Amino acid sequence: MKKRNLKRSFVILLLCFSAAAAMQLYVPPDDPVYGFLDRLETRGINRDLLNDIRPMLRDDIVKALLKAKEAETQLPYAERELLDYYLSEYRRELSELPHPLLIQGADTLDSYFGILRKGGIGREVKGLFSDRPGQERRHMYIYEDNGNTVWLDIGTVLRGEGKNEKLRAVNYYTGEIAVQAGENMALYVDGALFYQLKRDGFNEPAKEFAGYWYNDYEYEHLITYDRSRAYANLTGKFGTLSLSHYPMNWGNGKHSLIISQDAIEFGALQWTKEFKYFKYTFLHGSLMTSDFSWSEEEGRHYTPKYLVAHRAEGRFGSLLHMSISEMLVYGNRIPEPTYLVPVILLWPSEHALGDRDNKLIAIDAELFPINGLKLYGTFFLDEFSPTHFFEDWWANKYAVQAGMYWAPRKAPMDLRVEWTAVHPWTYAHRYPFASYTHHGKGLGFVYGPNTRLLTADINWDLTGRHRLSLQYKRLLEGADEIELGGIWYPSGGDPEQNYEERARELDDATGWLTGEFIRRTNSLAFSWYYRWRNQISFLTGCELRNVDGNNQAYYSLQIRLHY
């Protein structure tokens, strides 16, 4: 009990200091702090947060955590532990105190590289196994002065996976450097190398694989791939200007229809400016087609392809958040100057430029009828015919999503139920350089068009270190192709398909799910996350999956070390 009180007193002491340094580094879009803040927002704590574009800056996250600290007495004990843990990672923004590793006796250093010091390797290993959650995590290398910060980290994930009686290993190793250069610039780069053992009957890519380049080996059962992500952020009164190759998520659902964090990363220039009641974001990114031409003289040639997107998010009192997004994919030419204007309307601009690009628009909203309950939804429109809107017309290319999120005030848990339906041919285009895809994979809904998905998720934090999760999923997938008169035609189940090659006899009979064969998947998954030490965590889980009457069992055990 004394240690807990000391820890809590230390965090409160941090809050009494003025901020020592601004930090424009991103918080990764899959960081669990977003779910924690979403839970508090639903309960009525900090409804001012506009968090439907991720990643967000550390500065914005710490402001939200400070508001949560003001309402700490309303939180269950496990969530108070979580709040202290999250706040411990934002010492740089909250305090003038140096990192604990920089304090050596009576001296305070400006840099620390533990493994190069005398006896450093043993001391660092001991620290990894003795640091407790709630302490600021250590870094392999630290440099901090008045306005500059450099953190160097390495890590590894070791995971064993099983499918029925088949077993395989998936391992990867990471390194990352985060730099805050003065008050206004942040730089980040990471790299990862993945190893995956391939087994007959268990050839699915690991969940981390996102369109990276497979490296071929003479070893039949070994797959390797690598990736690097990076960004440079510049902030000021003008907002935040970012040049990045980094995952992102646009939308308020778990499975976004707009830009999904499951999509393959792409290079982009982004500008964001938040005002009192709304936030505006402009993005221009470079995409790749899945096919290329090749010649002896020039080698591979990919047709140029680009994405431009705008999003305006607003809050209307404490009960309603609304957003509108417009996206456009174009290519086969150099970047269009018109589309580089951050505030121009894309639909009329596309008409003025010859009506040759792929226009899309999305409207989403969140409603908080009572504290503890959030209702949300998204309407995503690719194309439609006003005279055929309520008919099974092939060009009614749109998607709908509706969800309910419940976070009771007295329990450290949340429940989410979400339903999604995506009409065939949504995201697709006649030209590959205009489809809503990157490297052949959709940018939006992870399961693509011609699908319906129902999910229900429960997360329960037993303590600040233990989380149990239970998920049910029912997925219906229409066919990617259909046969008519002995000829096979694409049926709009893949965003890479050319809709000019469709079976025109079915133009008036293209419902929400097309194809003679509808694939049905039902699954129930359970997972347990345990943060054993500040830098070492375990994740284990199992899933029972039924695909068209065939039962499959999946299971895994993962160890993660981040140093």
Image (tube, rainbow, N blue to C red):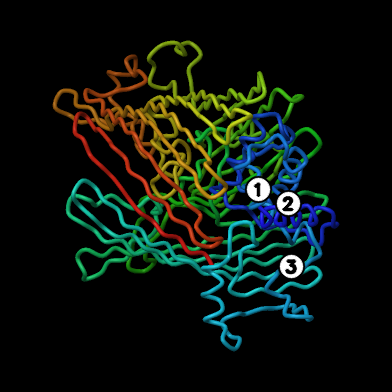
User: Residue 160 or 146: which is nearer the viewer?
Assistant: 160
Separation (CA) of disc 1 from disc 3: 18 Å
| Res. 181 mark | 3
Which quadrant of the view contains residue 497? Answer: top left
| Residue bearing the label numbered 2 | 240
User: Residue 167 or 231: which is nearer the viewer?
Assistant: 167
Residue occupying image coordinates x 28% and y 36%: 545
Q: Position of residue 258 (x, y in %)?
A: 53, 36
User: Would residue 521 appear left or right of 459 to someone viewing this image?
Assistant: left
| Residue bearing the label numbered 1 | 56
Q: Position of residue 143 (x, y in %)?
A: 70, 74
Residue occupying image coordinates x 78% and y 73%: 145
Separation (CA) of disc 1 from disc 2: 11 Å
Q: Quadrant of the C terminus?
A: bottom right
Contact, mark 1 vs mark 3 (Cβ under 8 Å): no
User: Would residue 296 appear left or right of 182 to someone viewing this image?
Assistant: left
Q: Position of residue 241 (x, y in %)?
A: 71, 53
Q: Hey, what amino acid is under mark 2?
A: Thr
